[in-house]
Amino acid sequence: MISELSFTEENYLKAIYHLSNEGGESVNTNSLAESMSTTPASVNDMVKRLAQKKLIGYQKYKGATLLSKGKKVALNIIRKHRLWEVFLVEKLEFKWDEVHEIAEQLEHIKSPNLIKRLDKFLGYPTMDPHGDPIPNEDGVMKETVRASISEVEVGESGIVVAVNNDDTLLLQHLDQIGIKLGSRIHIIDRMNFDGSISISIDEGPKQFISKTVAENLMITLTDKK
Amino acid sequence: MISELSFTEENYLKAIYHLSNEGGESVNTNSLAESMSTTPASVNDMVKRLAQKKLIGYQKYKGATLLSKGKKVALNIIRKHRLWEVFLVEKLEFKWDEVHEIAEQLEHIKSPNLIKRLDKFLGYPTMDPHGDPIPNEDGVMKETVRASISEVEVGESGIVVAVNNDDTLLLQHLDQIGIKLGSRIHIIDRMNFDGSISISIDEGPKQFISKTVAENLMITLTDKK
DNA sequence: ATTTATTTTTAGGTTAATCTAAATATTATT
DNA sequence: AATAATATTTAGATTAACCTAAAAATAAAT
């Protein structure tokens, strides 16, 4: 059994998971410090603690890597975070750009039974409102095939599953144009002079989005037609 | 504004509220220590901190009293606790004797907006699954007129709104006889030799409950008939 | 009104999680 | 390969929340 971790320990594990490409690579002290909004010295302290608990591997000057125990914890936190996000958006009618901070708190509630029941209540979702996959109880999540709109060929279409950027301004902009998760986007044309792209949203009228917006908008590719 | 309290500080304020009869009386160090499962020395430390923050009044050797700011915090925690309990029972199908610990965690989630929306989602309930009233945003709650079944006269009936005891065995026992919150109880007769009481539950067949059970079962009185 | 018992407070220490500033490794540059 | 730049670690402190043990104040009992 995994003893009982503090919120901080859980957050470090989650950060390591994200910074290491799903636990593959090793994470260096400085980037962890930045991601946790703290100092390298503090990270160093914590990294030692986590290594002692066999949650991460750590060698001086070589950075941290998730061990299986630590990865399991990280994936469970992510699972909880994303399930709560679904709850907040689907049931409490939050907008998808408002839920992150609250989910950051809710993800630390300790009760496996609660999460089982929440999962059931939500109808066993596999994606959160940002289009990120929700790991199952064993930490396994569906691989999603996605591409940014800027990479997709003219004529193709797909479903918006993620926004590659936490910038509130972008999120609000998307809201204004009427793009949200689940929107079906058809790529009509690409302008050569500034890279902007014309699309239709949910079979609606033609609209333009800037290159920057297109780069940050991820869709799942579906059949060409 | 109330700066930003730690979970522990919030729990102390809640404990003081409960031990002081809704913030009326002053609470002594020892009983607070017992209620918080800690030592009098630790309580003494915390009580000083809270007094410095003007949340409670405190004079050496005279115990602690809630100040208006502290009472507001306490009532808000209680509001959140009870709303979450309703959510757990009504939406996630927990039994009412399973929700306390989880609500103890959820009550500390910080987001006024979350609670507003949760309240709406639940249909603005005024009572939690244990029959305790839920304070509104201003800390005001409906006065509930209640009595233990042992005090009620033969012939009267009412709705079960609370169990005066956290004992799991009692709660499970009630579950077995089929008594739950919202059950309508009719008091048929009282046995003189052992104080046990015959009742009917939701217009069902006559059943006996012991004096002890009757003492712990609180109902709201309705019209005699 | 003393003495005894209880309650409360002080004093001094511990642990987790943080910090700043200084020292030491590692990596990059000439 | 020596030096400069960057990254990492150590050393030493701080704060919240706790602890034990001893001292002091209050309340109860004779």
Image (cartoon, coloured by chain):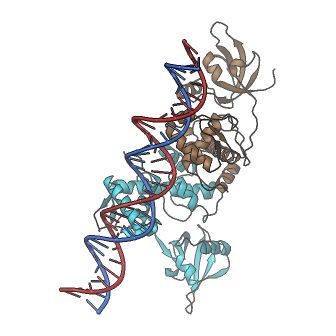
Chain colours: A brown, B cyan, C red, D blue
Residue at 61 percent across and 59 percent down: it is B89
Do we see residue B144 in this rendering?
A: no
Does A224 sit above or below residue B171? above
Of the 4 image quadrants, the one containing the C terminus of chain A is top right
- Quadrant location of residue C12? bottom left
Say how many tags the image has: 0
Q: Is residue A190 left or right of residue C26?
A: right
**Residue B138 coordinates in the image, percent (x, y):** 40, 52
Do we see residue B41 in this rendering?
A: yes
**Residue sitting nearer the eye, A16 or C30:** C30
**Residue sitting nearer the eye, A53 or B39:** A53
Of the 4 image quadrants, the one containing the N terminus of chain A is bottom right
**Residue sitting nearer the eye, A107 or B212:** A107
**Residue sitting nearer the eye, A138 or A206:** A138
**Residue A189 coordinates in the image, percent (x, y):** 71, 12
Residue at 62 percent across and 51 percent down: it is A53
Q: In this view, does A160 lie to the left or right of B101?
A: right
Q: Which residue lies furthest to the top in this view?
A: A193
Does A167 sit above or below residue A99? above
Q: Is residue B150 left or right of residue B58?
A: right
Does B14 sit above or below residue A170? below
**Residue B162 coordinates in the image, percent (x, y):** 53, 69
**Residue A48 coordinates in the image, percent (x, y):** 57, 45
- Quadrant location of residue B20? bottom left
